Amino acid sequence: MTSVVDADRVFAALADPRRRELLELLGRTPGCSASSLAARLPVSRQAVAQHLAVLVDSSLVSRRRAGREVLFSVRPEGLTATADWLTGRAAAWRERLEFLKREAEAGNRLPAPATASRRTPRGESRSSAG
């Protein structure tokens, strides 16, 4: 679950406030059916089922059959893996910023990013050689 594709799925799933609300409900009361969740929300059972399908596809929720009902529960490993990925990105940026700070404090001039041209404040292009 550490790939960017999986993180993208999780972020897309969590982008919707109703899905976040469903996750919160399932976190408090695991093993709920779509009907019991819909009874607590101002949306139809079909809408809840669609949101749950997205949460299942993003590995944030699991489903299991219990007789005629399908029960849903949170899969914490999906959130944990995404949080780990975010922590890794934050650590990488922190290291980069600390490096830049050390270099700036030491008076070292950092090379400009490798680009074919730079933009002036007005957005006009000028050659990086000139």
Image (cartoon, rainbow, N blue to C red):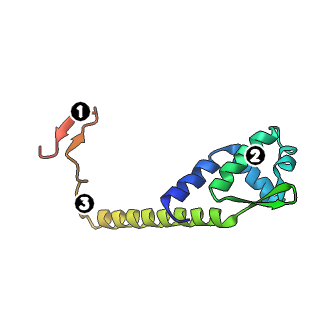
Which element type, helix, strand or loop, lies under badge 3?
Answer: loop
- Mark before the other along the chain sequence, 1 or 2: 2
Image check: 96 left or right of 125? Answer: right
6 lies above or below 47: below
Q: Is residue 30 visible?
A: no
The residue under label 1 is: 124
- Mark before the other along the chain sequence, 2 or 3: 2
Badge 2: how crowded within 10 Å, few (<14), some, or many (20+)? Answer: some
Name which residue lies at 72% across and 50% down.
52
Residue 37: x percent and y percent? 83, 48
Residue 8: x percent and y percent? 53, 53
In which quarter of the view is residue 103 placed? bottom left
Q: Are marks 1 and 2 in contact (CB under 8 Å)?
A: no
Q: CA distance from mark 1 to mark 2?
A: 51 Å
Indicate the quadrant containing the C terminus: top left, top right, bottom left or bottom right.
top left
Q: Nearer the viewer, mark 3 or mark 1?
A: 1
